[in-house]
Image (tube, grey):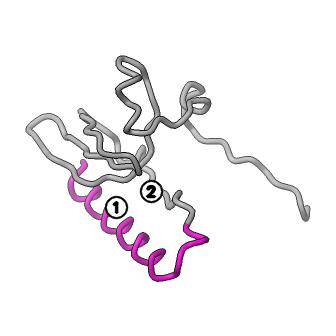
Amino acid sequence: MCGSHRRATASRSDSLRTMDRTLIADLGEHIDERVEVRGWVQAIRDQKRIQFVILRDRTGLAQAALAYVPRERLILCTNCGMAPMPRHIAYAKLGALARGAQLARTRIT
């Protein structure tokens, strides 16, 4: 039907669905709490049994330790408001997203 919209549901837990985003600069206020942080991966450092992901948002950097993340749980997203951007910047961001996807495919098993 024209004009009708359907809401897509994510396969995430209810606690994550209602969780507000926490900026990296505010993480110190949430010690020992579960938070949702959104950003992009700046680097991945492999150790023997653990991987460290350096995550960046507009306020800073955070390091997260990942013991194991199945590939099917990784989601690439352009959630950065690309519509109001100049075309060359949007293309550069998409290129960075593609390079990040390639990095994840080769480094995260």
Residue 60 location, x and y as percent? 33, 46
- Which x, y percent locates residue 40? 37, 53
* Residue at screen point 43% across, 23% down: 34
**Identity, as a three-letter code, of the amino acid under mark 1:** Ala
* Residue under the point 52% across and 37% down: 21
Q: Residue at x 60, y 71 (%)?
A: 84
Q: Earlier in the sequence, mark 2 or mark 1?
A: 2
Task: From the viewer's perspective, tell me whether residue 10 is left or right of residue 66.
Answer: right
Q: Where is mark 2, residue-wise?
A: 76
Amino acid on which disc 2 is placed: Leu
Front position in the image: 61 or 71: 61
**Residue 97 inside the magenta-drawn segment:** yes
- Which residue is farthest bottom? 88
At mark 2, the secondary structure is: loop
Q: Position of residue 55 (x, y in %)?
A: 31, 46
Identify the residue at horizontal 56%, vertical 30% (top origin): 19
Q: Quadrant of residue 35?
A: top left
The residue range painted magenta reads 82-109
Viewer-nearest residue: 45 or 9:
45
Which part of the image, by quadrant, shows the N terminus? bottom right
Q: Nearer the viewer, residue 7 or 96?
A: 96
- Judge left or right: residue 51 versus residue 1: left
Q: Position of residue 37 (x, y in %)?
A: 43, 39
38 to the left or right of 66: right
Contact flag, marks 2 and 1 (Cβ < 8 Å): yes
Residue 70 picture quarter: top left
Which residue is label 1 attached to? 101
Whether 99 is among the magenta residues is yes
> Spatial distance from mark 2 to mark 1, Cα to Cα?
7 Å
Q: Which structural element holds mark 1?
A: helix
Estimate how packed mark 2 is, as few (under 14), some (14 to 19) or many (20 or more) residues with alpha carbons within 10 Å.
Answer: few
